[in-house]
Amino acid sequence: MKISILTLFPNMFDGIFTESILKRAIENERIEIELINFRDYTLDPHNKVDDAPFGGGAGMVLMCQPIFDAVDAIRTPESKVILLTPAGKVYNQKTAYELRNEKHLIIICGHYEGFDDRIRTIADLELSIGDYVLTGGEVPAMVLVDSITRLLPGVIREESYTEDSFTANTLDYPVYTHPRNFRGMEVPEILLSGDHKKIEEYRREEAIKRTIEVRPDLLK
Ligand SMILES: C[S@@+](CC[C@H](N)C(=O)[O-])C[C@H]1O[C@@H](n2cnc3c(N)ncnc32)[C@H](O)[C@@H]1O
């Protein structure tokens, strides 16, 4: 899969692609990341990419031309264009599973007050990462790239994500490691029993218990 990220701040992505699992996924060619500064596409003599909103109001609005031209330059019939906006459909694990099947994602990061509404016409999908407002789409783009990459074949072991939270409409079960007793807190006996069937049942029950407590909406 290839992911092209359109941003005014490509340096913000430095850390995330040079560490840990994402770094390995790039090195092993499971994923290709392309960072594009859409300021490079502006036709404005002063390199402007934003302007004041018609009708007045706070903040600057990203203009159509640089973003349209950047998308036109890289879009192919296999591309899916995602616009990041708090007004989009709320992103979740189900959407991550759907997007992992795409060949090429183009992710547009807004900034400032947002973007000219006509930019929505080039998007196949508008996504929000939650009901709060960030300064720009860079962190949401990182959230998408990270959550999709770990679902790609050969990035992490399949068992590592098929039992994750949200996969079976529950949160994950609690896990423990050494020592067996830490500050008086014991690891549940059943996990030390070696009885795999019982352990599986226990984990399923704990996952449901935790989901009812914290996220009953998931079980509906
Ligand atoms: C300050 S925000 C603009 C917020 C906009 N005025 C509004 O209230 O919907 C600037 C950019 O950050 C990105 N952004 C901020 N919060 C986001 C979220 N929860 N999900 C996805 N993108 C977000 C979007 O690309 C947005 O265009």
Image: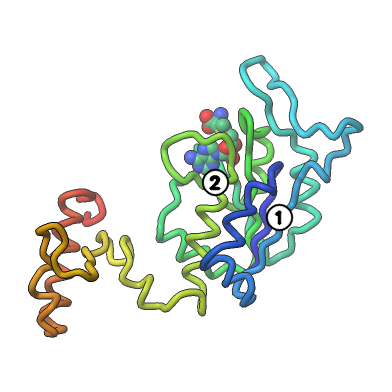
Mark 2 secondary-structure assignment = helix
Question: What residue is pinned by disc 2?
Answer: 139
The percent coordinates of residue 171 (x first, y second) are: 26, 59
Q: Residue at x 13, y 78 (%)?
A: 192
Task: Indicate yes or no: mark 2 CB to ligand 1 under 8 Å.
Answer: yes
Displayed quadrant of residue 201? bottom left
Q: Residue at x 59, y 45 (%)?
A: 138
**Count of all numbered marks drawn on residues in the image:** 2
In this rendering, would 166 be left or right of 39? left
Which corner quadrant holds the N terminus? bottom right
Query: Quick one: label 2, few (<14), some, or many (20+) residues within 10 Å?
Result: some
Image quadrant, ligand 1:
top right
Q: What colour scheme governs how the chains and residues are painted in the rendered image of this protein? A: rainbow
The percent coordinates of residue 72 (x first, y second) are: 78, 53
Query: Quick one: label 1, few (<14), some, or many (20+) residues within 10 Å?
Result: some
Q: Amino acid at mark 2?
A: Val
Q: Amino acid at mark 1?
A: Leu
**Front-most of 57 and 76?**
57
> Which disc number belongs to residue 11?
none
Whether residue 48 is situated above or below residue 212 in the rendered picture: above
> Which disc number belongs to residue 35?
1
In this rendering, would 25 be left or right of 207? right
Q: CA distance from mark 2 to mark 1?
A: 14 Å
Whether residue 81 is situated above or below residue 29 in the rendered picture: above
In this rendering, would 107 be left or right of 150? right
**Front-most of 121 and 40?**
40
Whether residue 105 is situated above or below residue 133 in the rendered picture: below
